[in-house]
């Protein structure tokens, strides 16, 4: 058996799923998908269920937060499909403007409908941007564009990266936290 679904009072359905990658029992919540418990090899489903039941208060708190994220994502999705050409034009123009303004250089830009990321920067300084960025508030779009531009110079998320990003915009970490509210749009 690779998975088992249980019901926990006050929480609802919880998926217990065998994971060859997990080293420990791991409880996660994903918008529109619910609660999942990763069960490592060698750990019984009964033990994983007991772990989930012991964390009911934590799960309930996060279910409330997830409800807010799902509501935000639903509202944005109801605005209809994104016009690919308009999104491409808008994102590429703004990226070029920010790069010029702050002295960054990059190679190519790709606009994709990614499922897990808002953007990324390759080792060759090619920048990938999520099509759904255009649905975000302007300050978050700029945050993501600058985030990827900084990656053309600093290839990790260490202190140097955050220091440089903070010189370009106030409260980068705060904007990063705000962005989490929109994570459900990536699914």
Image (cartoon, grey):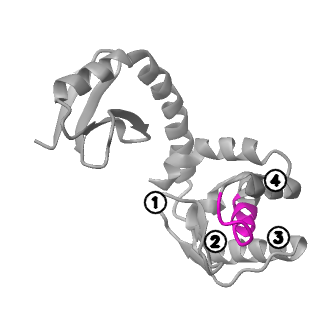
Classify mark 2: helix, strand or loop. Answer: helix
How crowded pointer 1 is (Cα within 10 Å; few <14, some 14-19, many 20+) is rated as few
Circle 3 sits in a helix, a strand or a loop, which is it?
helix
Q: CA distance from mark 1 to mark 3?
A: 25 Å
Residue drawn 83% across the image and 52% down it? 166
Q: Quadrant of the N terminus?
A: top left
Nearer the observer, 81 or 60: 60
Q: Is 165 in the magenta?
A: no
**Image quarter of residue 93:** bottom right
State yes or no: discs 1 and 2 in contact (Cβ < 8 Å): no
Residue 121 visible, this angle = yes
| Part of the protein shown in magenta | 144-156
Earlier residue among tags 2 and 4: 2
Give the foreground label among 3 and 4. Answer: 4
> What is the distance, in whole Å, between disc 3 and disc 4 at their CAs?
18 Å
- Residue 31 is left or right of residue 89, and the answer is left
Q: Which residue is mark 2?
A: 87
The residue shown at (44%, 41%) is: 31
The image shows residue 146 at horizontal and vertical percentages of: 76, 63
* Percent x, y of residue 90: 71, 72
Looking at the image, residue 24 sits to the left or right of residue 170; the answer is left
Q: Pointer 4: what residue? A: 163
Residue 135 image offset from top left, x and y in percent: 63, 57
**Label 3 belongs to which residue?**
98
* Badge 3 or badge 2: first in the primary sequence: 2
């Amino acid at each position: 058996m690779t998975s088992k679904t249980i019901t926990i009072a006050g929480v609802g359905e919880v998926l217990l799923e065998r994971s060859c990658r997990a080293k420990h029992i791991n409880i996660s919540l994903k918008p529109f998908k619910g609660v999942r418990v990763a069960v490592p090899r060698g750990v019984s489903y009964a033990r994983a269920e007991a772990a989930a039941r012991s964390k009911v208060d934590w799960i309930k708190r996060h279910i409330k937060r997830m409800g807010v994220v799902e509501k935000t994502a639903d509202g944005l999705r109801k605005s209809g499909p994104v016009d690919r050409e308009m999104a491409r034009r808008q994102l590429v123009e703004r990226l070029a403007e920010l790069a010029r303004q702050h002295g960054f250089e990059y190679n190519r830009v790709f606009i994709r409908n990614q499922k897990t990321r808002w953007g990324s920067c390759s080792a060759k300084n090619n920048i990938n941007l999520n099509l759904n960025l255009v649905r975000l508030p302007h300050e978050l779009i700029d945050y993501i564009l600058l985030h990827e531009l900084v990656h053309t110079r600093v290839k990790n998320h260490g202190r140097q990266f955050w220091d440089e990003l903070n010189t370009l915009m106030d409260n980068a970490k705060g904007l990063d936290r705000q962005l989490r509210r929109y994570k459900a749009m990536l699914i």
